[in-house]
Amino acid sequence: MNKFLLFLCSLSFQVIFAQPNTEIFLFNLNTNSGGFELSNFKNISQNEGYDNQPSFLDDNSILYAGTRNGQTDIVKYYVNYDSKIFINHTDGSEYSPLKIPNDNAVSSIRLEKDGAQKLYKYSLKNGESEVLIDDIIIGYHVWFDDKTLVSSVLEDNGLSLFATHFDENKNYRLQKKIGRSLHKIPNTDLVSFISKENDSLWEIKSLNPFSGVTKSIVMTLPQAEDMCWLPNGTILMGKDDRLYTFRPNYDVDWNEVASLEEFKISNITRVIVSPDGTKFALVGQGGLATKENTESGTTKTETSKENPTEIEAIVQKQLEAYNNRDIDAFMATYSQDIKLYNYPNELTTEGQEQMRKSYKEWFDKTPDLNAHIKKRMVIGNKVIDEEQVTANGQIFHAVAIYEIENGLIKKVTFIQ
């Protein structure tokens, strides 16, 4: 690729993703009896700069591209803990993270500092990455299955619809002039995309990624392209500060179902719903940071400046890896210069290599290993856990003080 074309492609990508000061908002969603009720509003990013492109990893965790140290990286947000961690540590910027079917990994588009743009695979165990696709310049993508990818590819100063079949190692161009929104259609073997062949009338269409056959579903809201599917097959779109639904083969027009004016959210772009249909997330600008306080049996909402804690999530992640005796996932939560102490200041282990060796031996010879947290306290960058540990038929009690820097555990002090 010549330098001029590379510049154009890189510029197109930056225009597509350039949405300064966007935030990600989460709601509980109730669609029982055909309704559309939102509750428990929360700003889950609360971060200056670009936070965008959320996708549900599962019913209780969300992936998104979040700004950190002047670039965007992959964030994993834990709904139950109201906490987040960064799962990768590269020099490039990552966008559009998605769970890869049948794999403990996510895919994401990486924009390197030299302008190269490739689709990578990132392990959820340790954050290690490898190139998946580098012969087309993907802007957005969706997994049809673990061997088939549908994507919006940057070419001719626009986006074209492609299907990649990994078993054939081939990319197929299916249509030019499409939008960024790509989704699996529930309970079908089809993918939806936004056709922009008519500049003034955009259209939601279905695609069979194997035959290439496309069919019309409905015209979009005027000049709106961000949509998702509810589990029951209803289409949800956002425009300005309003949400609309359309039920294929039933509705004749879009129906307004919610206004986000009271939450001061405007310029809605991405919208997503959890696999079980009980949680709804969107990207927008503005918005209130809220917390709920119960006083005298009533609940009120007020502005909050508290940020979700990242450090509790990383400690929880290492606990889960410890109980699974997964040495790679366990060590991925620690810094390279990790130090372990016995209280108050007896250094017992220094560095990843020494720690990995001792814990690998411990995991291998302790099949019943399990740590249970009885109490947890978070103070500043420290997480203090009171632990009950079962090992080789015996039960031990201890306190562990974890100190976190730059998203990783840097120091642990044990009190026996």
Image (cartoon, helix red, strand yellow):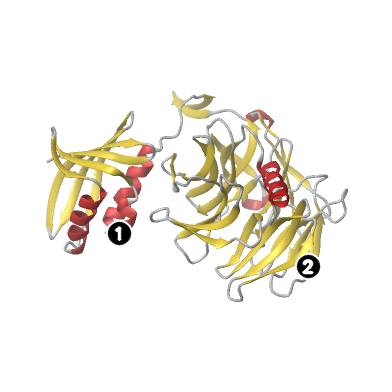
| Quarter in which the N terminus is drawn | bottom right
Amino acid on which disc 1 is placed: Asp
Mark 1 element type: loop
Looking at the image, residue 59 lies above or below residue 91? below
Q: Which amino acid lies under the numbered mark 2 shown in the image of this protein? A: Thr
- Hey, which residue is sitting farthest front in the picture? 2
Which residue bears the numbered disc 2?
A: 214
Q: Nearer the viewer, mark 2 or mark 1?
A: 1
Q: In the rendered structure, which disc, 2 or 1, sits on the residue that comes first in sequence?
A: 2
Where residue 240 sits: x, y (%)? 74, 36
- Image quadrant where one finds the C terminus: top left
Mark 2, other Cα within 10 Å: few <14 / some 14–19 / many ≥20: some
Q: Position of residue 397 (x, y in %)?
A: 14, 45
Residue 326 disc label: 1
Marks 2,1: beta carbons within 8 A? no
Q: Quadrant of residue 214?
A: bottom right
Residue 62 makes an appearance in the image:
yes
Could you say which disc has been placed on residue 305 in the image?
none
Residue 10, percent across and down?
67, 47
Q: Position of residue 251 (x, y in %)?
A: 80, 55
Residue at 14%, 33% (x, y): give it: 345
**What residue is shown at x 26% (from left), y 49% (from top)?**
352
Q: Quadrant of residue 370?
A: bottom left
